[in-house]
Image (cartoon, rainbow, N blue to C red):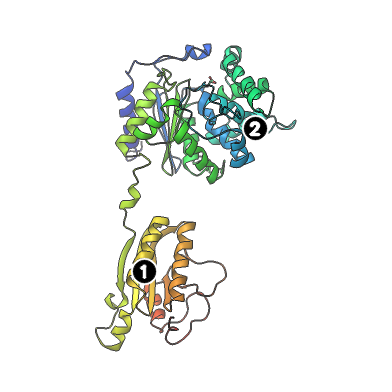
Amino acid sequence: MSPATGAVTEALGELHARYADVGDGELADYIPQLALADPDDFGLALVSMDGHRYSAGDADVPFTAQSVSKPFVYALALSLLGLDEVSRWVNAEPSGEAFNGISLERTTGRPANAMVNAGAIVTTALIPHTPGTPRFTRILDCLSRFAGRSLDVDEQVYASESFTGDRNRALAYLIRSTGPLPVDPVAAVETYFRQCAVRVTALDLAAMAATLAHGGVNPLTGEQVVSEAVAAQVLAVMATCGMYDSSGAWLLRVGLPAKSGVSGGLIAAGPARFGVAAYSPPLDTTGTSVRGRLAIGELSRRLGLHLMRNPALAASTVTLVTTAGDLPTAPAAGHERAAHEDVAVVAAQGALDFTAAERVLHALDEAGPEGTGAVLDLVRVTGIGGVARAMLRDGLVRLTADGLRTAVADPDGLLRRPGHEDGDPRIFATREEAVDWCLGRGGGGSGPPARPGPPPSGP
Ligand code: GLU
């Protein structure tokens, strides 16, 4: 029993109960085996960034991934060939057309995006095929690493689609006739059918979506399956093209990168938050699971997960903007007190990204430039992203160049870098030591030996 996190399981359970009786939708029957699915099957699963797994209903029932495989094979192609090369063959524009539409650029024959069948067939064809490592081996291995376990193929569903898949074959021939398909269309389509027939569960799909949300690192296994850049590229295409001809409405109302498939699977990813998946075979007219769409849409609304609503803005980053004269350690009056008042002190807390770093720099500008020194207190900062680190270093270097003595209270060395460049701020373990150094009293800290006496005067 997990009483505390039971609340998450319960939330999924409530969604499940709420939509389990919805009877709308039709099973896909153009692949005969898919028409044999149980329309009552309904599973929900969520995987957190820490690899915690939650589920409700039939989250362990196996089914074939179908189009939900597409973003992951696109990720593999991007990893192996890079965005520029892949984009030569497959564009990234929403097609506004059905999943099996002839979504090809008129002059080049390039498919609109990798989430519709035309683009997915070309993407599959781009995966290298070598005698030692056949194309499909690479694909199955990649899908398995996203799921965190070895997946296999439902041979009956594969055979069923291969038998009836003339529309996809026709698409492949059409692509080759208008623009060069990198391989034989028949071979490309057979591999694509196999990739669609890879067997998964809702829990597998939630882990796969969570891996994209987690910067390409599978939160269950810890493996970096694709780079952070590739994960972001895939999420971007899922956000604009993942729900076929209802992609715009989905982004507007639900606000999460997602991908649906005709077997009834649906995934959505909350970047840096979670991966979620639904399985329920009856589909709406766009080929998306009816219950899946309802449940994930409601989950996003209830938990305020819409991407365009960014709660980070509300968090307070800068906790103190003052001078050393206002600190409890300052002398009550006299020359010493005046010296303290000339040293600005800005303290920050939490994890610093671009937005937070801009706030900190603004606070330093507000508090610092007229004085003789500036202290940035990072004691309560838990982490600094690469962009924020560069911004803060640059801002401090600029203050130093302006003639201020600048020091950082940074016990964890978040701003420290190997070596030391001229103008780099001094780094101390505590705010008091940093203030002392700015007053020309202390020594130590990292960097070149402290220059005694007053700071050089600015221009
Ligand atoms: N294998 C299916 C097809 O190509 C996938 C379509 C889908 O899931 O949307 O028709």
The residue indicated by pointer 1 is 364
Q: Tell me the SS state at disc 2.
A: helix
Residue type at tag 1: Leu
Of residues 143 and 372, the one drawn nearer to the viewer in this rendering: 372
Quadrant where the N terminus sits is top left
Q: Position of residue 34 (x, y in %)?
A: 50, 15
15 left or right of 199?
Answer: left
Q: Please give the name of the residue rendered at 42% of the width and 86% of the height, measured from the top-left corner.
A: 454
Relative vertical location of residue 423 with respect to residue 223 in this rendering, above or below: below
Residue type at tag 2: Leu
Of residues 97 and 412, the one drawn nearer to the viewer in this rendering: 97
Q: In the current view of this chain or complex, which residue is farthest to the right?
A: 131
Q: In the current view of this chain or complex, which residue is farthest to the front?
A: 107
Of residues 229 and 333, the one drawn nearer to the viewer in this rendering: 229
Tell me the distance, in whole angstroms, between the alpha carbons under discs 1 and 2.
51 Å
Tell me if residue 182 can be seen.
yes
Q: Position of residue 208 (x, y in %)?
A: 50, 34
The residue indicated by pointer 2 is 126
Asked whether the beta carbons under mark 1 and mark 2 sit within 8 Å of each other, the answer is no
Q: Position of residue 293 (x, y in %)?
A: 38, 26
Q: Please give the name of the residue rendered at 43% of the width and 83% of the height, measured from the top-left corner.
A: 455
Tell me if residue 198 can be seen.
no
